[in-house]
Image (cartoon, rainbow, N blue to C red):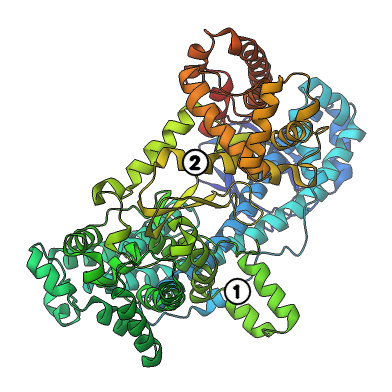
């Protein structure tokens, strides 16, 4: 062996140099740059262990500080064998060095692969949403050819999962065990390095290819020519700021893109900083009003910011004509609607079920959906929506006379100052359609329980639409909104109204049976009632889903709370609808529930019913075809068994059996109706007030699947009727807590990270203070 000293920052080897010697770091540090990542090694490392088989350097080697290397001549793998025969103590050094370098590159493989997938998904999703946004705002979108032709990363070769698992397992073995396996003698050690080299050559080629794909994607996002997605987003943002349009969505996209680029090591920092600075300076000037004079002619002021009641009524004069004109429907349709409306307005008893009133009311209801659809689709594709139309979309308002002066003014002010948050779980129907139009959510199922995509497939198979039409409709935001209005909206607007025989979709004073302030549902009101329910049944909206936050944690299912979407229909009503428990086949998507925006019944009772329905439907979905099979214990199976065999149940007294019979008759033999009625009693009476109302079987089922939070267990525990169930519940939860602690300890020991999400899950069982 000979010794060579390299100065700080001196190049030692470059890629493609022939390997003529084996280099062992005696002192100092060396940076290894593979092109897709860099690592620094110190004394005791053999530099090119993974590259000896290749016979050429794949990386660039540079001294980080003054470094001394011990060099051994190398011609072929036999040279290594001869050296190790003379110096057997070096077997451990070369294997450990090579394995560590291999594992570092393997870790980068996982990062690069995730990067390829994530960048492709990000670019295609954001580009599609950019196109939707431009279409909605009636702005010509820019076509970026590089994105149009971008394909998902498909490697020319793959690094098999069994090899990845093999090398990771080797790295985790105790040092002595690994030594005994890989380098007990010079021949075995040389063979180990030989096979390391074969696998490393493949890993290096794939990593290099993935790095190039990542670079290609990032060049689409930002490059020196300026023909990139960053500039495209900035240009649209500037247009919206200049025209005083709704620039919040595009600002959010800009911030997300900026964050992604700043975090990438493959992006030119100077170029990015220059472009960010130029854009943000431009936006600052616009906001400061320095260049507003150039765009005044394009600025559309909101002329509807009115406060005086008389001015508001002047604005609302002829509301029906204004709305029909906005719809741009054929005069034949609008004239017929006006005629029916005028005829209906003349009836003294508008809630009458007489044929003459009923027929006119039905005609109005049928045409109302067509007008609502035409107006709302037009609104989604324009920048400014008049307040009058917002009143129509939010409350079903169409006429100032049938609404009454006071109500019309109140509706105007509510629509003008609407404070619903688009990111909340409580949304108006208009906001819900915006989410569908923007691609944030898919349309709801239709009345046949069929998803939008499945419905298109059925139409394609039956020949109703062609393959080209299918592909176009698959991504058409207008078509998705129309599907939602024609199906979910049409059914739920009528159902939430509550009185199907006298359903009237237009806001009318005679239907408002409560003061407006008491009937108007706000986000805080709904969520407060929902929290009151989950304060008792704290697991009501938790789902068991697969954890994907850490690749090192395999097959971990945990429970996560997913609050439902609550969509406010534009009517006066008193019923709720639990439309669907998940979206598509994804178990981690929110349920969809509907309420009237002007609610005239007791909200707590309806939300209890909806929560009970959700519990029932979610259980049925989880259990599938065996939802009523008592051998597979579940909420639905045990309740089904109880109702089916209650007459033979020795736990029930004659009185309890008679009550159950009455309950079944009252619920029209609907298992779900029976359960939801008993669920409401369980929450309101038994849990909150420790007042026994259920029979023994019902109580046992509720304690097994809808158990109360610890706050209410304390109160219930004072009654001997509940104590036996509580003791069993506490034992089961203690066992669950123990198993979670053991699992998390194992994860931590194996190098995994317990995320805040998982900590929240553990707190449900382990930490009484955090488990509600």
Looking at the picture, tell me which residue is in the foreground, 315 or 303: 315
Image marks 2 and 1: residues in contact by CB distance under 8 Å: no
How far apart are labels 2 and 1 at the CA level? Answer: 60 Å
| Residue shown at 32% from the left, 64% from the top | 507
Position in image of residue 112 (x %, y %)? 62, 53
Residue bearing mark 1? 474
**Badge 2 local density, few (<14 within 10 Å), some, or many (20+)?**
some
* Disc number placed over residue 630 in the picture, else none: none
Position in image of residue 389 (x %, y %)? 29, 71
Kindly state the secondary structure of the residue where label 1 is placed. helix
Kindly state the secondary structure of the residue where label 2 is placed. loop
Looking at the picture, tell me which residue is in the foreground, 730 or 617: 617
Q: Is residue 7 above or below residue 205?
A: above
Eye-nearest disc, 2 or 1: 1
Position in image of residue 160 (x %, y %)? 80, 50
Residue bearing mark 2? 8
**Does the rendering let one see residue 739?**
yes
**Does the rendering let one see residue 13?**
no
């Amino acid at each position: 062996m000979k010794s060579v000293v390299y100065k700080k920052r001196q190049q030692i080897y470059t890629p493609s140099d022939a390997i003529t010697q084996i280099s062992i770091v005696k002192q100092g540090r060396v940076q290894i740059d593979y092109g897709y990542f860099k690592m620094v090694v110190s004394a005791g490392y053999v530099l090119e262990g993974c590259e000896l088989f290749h016979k050429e350097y794949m990386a660039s080697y540079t001294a980080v500080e003054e470094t001394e290397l011990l060099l051994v001549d190398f011609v072929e793998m036999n040279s290594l064998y001869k050296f190790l025969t003379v110096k057997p103590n070096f077997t451990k050094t070369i294997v450990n060095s090579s394995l560590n370098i291999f594992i570092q590159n393997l870790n980068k493989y996982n990062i690069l692969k995730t990067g390829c997938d994530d960048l492709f998904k990000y670019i295609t999703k954001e580009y599609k949403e950019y196109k939707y946004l431009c279409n909605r705002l009636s702005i010509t979108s820019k076509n970026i050819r590089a994105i149009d032709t971008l394909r998902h990363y498909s490697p020319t070769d793959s690094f098999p999962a069994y090899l990845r698992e093999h090398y990771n397992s080797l790295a985790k073995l105790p040092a002595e065990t690994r030594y005994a396996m890989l380098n007990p003698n010079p021949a075995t050690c040389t063979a180990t390095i030989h096979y390391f080299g074969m696998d490393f050559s493949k890993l290096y080629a794939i990593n290099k290819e993935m790095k190039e794909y990542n670079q290609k994607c990032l060049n689409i996002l930002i490059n020196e020519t300026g023909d990139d997605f960053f500039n495209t987003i900035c240009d649209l943002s500037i247009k919206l700021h200049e025209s005083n349009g709704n620039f919040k969505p595009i600002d959010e996209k800009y911030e997300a893109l900026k964050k992604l680029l700043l975090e990438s090591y493959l992006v030119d920092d100077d170029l990015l900083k220059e472009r960010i600075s130029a854009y943000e300076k431009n936006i600052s000037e616009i906001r400061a009003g320095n260049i507003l004079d150039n765009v005044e002619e394009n600025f559309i002021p909101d002329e509807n910011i009115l406060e005086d009641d008389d001015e508001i009524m002047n604005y609302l004069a002829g509301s029906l004509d204004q709305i029909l004109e906005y719809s741009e429907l054929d005069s034949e349709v609008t004239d017929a609607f006006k005629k029916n409306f005028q005829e209906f307005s003349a009836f003294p008893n508008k809630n009458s079920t007489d044929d003459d009133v009923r027929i006119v009311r039905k005609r109005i209801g049928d045409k109302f959906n067509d007008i609502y659809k035409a107006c709302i689709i037009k609104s989604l594709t324009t920048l400014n929506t008049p307040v009058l139309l917002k009143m129509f979309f939010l409350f079903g308002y169409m006429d100032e006379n049938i609404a009454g002066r006071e109500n019309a003014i109140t509706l105007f002010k509510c629509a003008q100052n609407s404070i619903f948050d688009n990111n909340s779980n409580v949304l108006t129907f208009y906001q819900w359609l915006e989410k569908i139009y923007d691609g944030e959510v898919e349309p709801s199922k239709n009345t046949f329980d069929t998803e939008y995509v499945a419905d298109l497939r059925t139409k394609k198979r039956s020949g109703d639409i062609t393959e080209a039409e299918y592909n176009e409709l698959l991504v058409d935001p207008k078509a998705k909104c129309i599907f939602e209005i024609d199906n979910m909206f049409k059914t739920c607007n009528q159902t939430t109204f509550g009185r199907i025989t006298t359903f009237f979709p237009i806001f009318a004073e005679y239907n408002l049976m409560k003061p407006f302030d008491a009937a108007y549902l706000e986000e805080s009101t709904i969520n407060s009632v929902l929290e009151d329910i989950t304060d008792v049944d704290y697991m009501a909206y938790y789902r068991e889903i697969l954890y994907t936050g850490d690749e090192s944690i395999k097959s971990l299912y945990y429970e996560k709370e997913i609050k439902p979407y609550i969509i406010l229909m534009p009517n006066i009503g008193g019923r709720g609808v639990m439309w669907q428990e998940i979206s598509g086949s994804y178990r981690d998507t929110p349920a969809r529930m509907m309420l009237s925006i002007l609610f005239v019944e007791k909200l707590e009772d309806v939300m209890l019913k909806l929560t009970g329905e959700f519990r029932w439907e979610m259980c049925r979905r989880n259990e599938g075809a065996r939802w009523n099979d008592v051998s597979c214990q579940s909420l639905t199976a045990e309740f089904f068994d109880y109702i089916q065999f209650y007459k033979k149940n020795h736990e029930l007294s004659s009185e309890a059996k008679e009550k159950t019979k009455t309950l079944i008759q009252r619920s029209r033999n609907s298992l779900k109706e029976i359960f939801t009625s008993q669920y409401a009693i369980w929450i309101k009476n038994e849990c909150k007030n420790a007042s026994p109302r259920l029979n023994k079987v019902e109580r046992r089922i509720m304690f097994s699947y809808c158990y109360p939070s610890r706050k209410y267990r304390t109160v219930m525990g004072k009654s001997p009727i509940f104590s036996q169930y509580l003791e069993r519940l506490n034992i089961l939860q203690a066992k669950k807590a123990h198993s979670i602690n053991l699992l998390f300890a194992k994860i931590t020991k194996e190098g995994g990270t317990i995320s805040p999400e998982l900590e929240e899950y553990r707190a449900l069982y382990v930490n009484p203070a955090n488990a509600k």
